[in-house]
Image (spheres, helix red, strand yellow):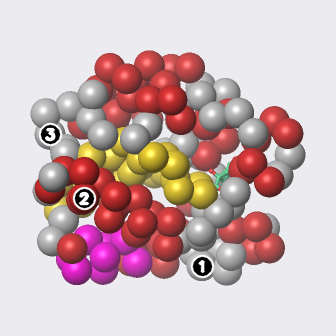
Amino acid sequence: MKLLILNGPNLNLLGVREPEIYGNGTYADLCKLIEAHAAAIGAEIEIRQTNHEGVLVDWIQEARGKFDGIVLNPAAYTHTSVALLDAVLAAGVPTVEVHLSDPDRREPFRRVSYVRPACVACVKGRGPEGYLEAMNLLKLKIDS
Ligand code: CA2
């Protein structure tokens, strides 16, 4: 099973600011946690982060035929990007939307997710553990 883990804008700043929302862990800590879990469940993974919407679109397109599932934290593009919705729909690769915080309990503008209708599940408000939950959900779906 090959999973692509995609992170959107500013997630590289984890641990630098806003610890009350995103916790104290750094982006490197998050990657280590995901890598350890991948090894535990026997998944091959690639973890990528970009601040650019079009790069996320390119990576989602690239996943078709190459990865069995995508864990996607589109960050702020969650709330703005029809391009990401279209890319997930076009890729046809099972995708789980993940958020460290729970955007539905924050500012009203975060309550809209453009990508959600194209995703098989959404895990939010569970911190870094949410990525692991998303990987487990994809494993269940792919193995069934
Ligand atoms: O909770 C999440 O994972 C979000 O996707 C994070 C995004 C936010 O726009 C979404 O509404 C919810 C923001 C990521 C920015 O992360 C930072 C981390 C440290 C300092 C500043 C930003």
> Label 2, on which residue?
140
> Label 1, on which residue?
25
Height in image: 13 above or below 112? below
Element at badge 3?
Answer: loop
Height in image: 24 above or below 62? below
In percent of width and height, residue 114 lies at: 59, 28
* Mark closest to the chain's N terminus, 3 or 1: 1
Element at badge 1?
Answer: loop
Comparing 122 with 2, the one in front is 122
Residue 35 inside the magenta-drawn segment: yes
What residue lies at 15% left-to-right and 71% top-to-bottom? 42
Residue 11 inside the magenta-drawn segment: no
Q: Which quadrant does the N terminus fall into? A: bottom left
> Label 3, on which residue?
66
| Three-letter amino acid code at the position of disc 1 | Gly
In percent of width and height, residue 16 lies at: 70, 71
What residue lies at 86% left-to-right and 46% top-to-bottom? 107
Mark 3 Cα-neighbour bin, 10 Å: few <14, some 14–19, many ≥20: few
What's drawn in magenta, residue-wise? Answer: 33-40
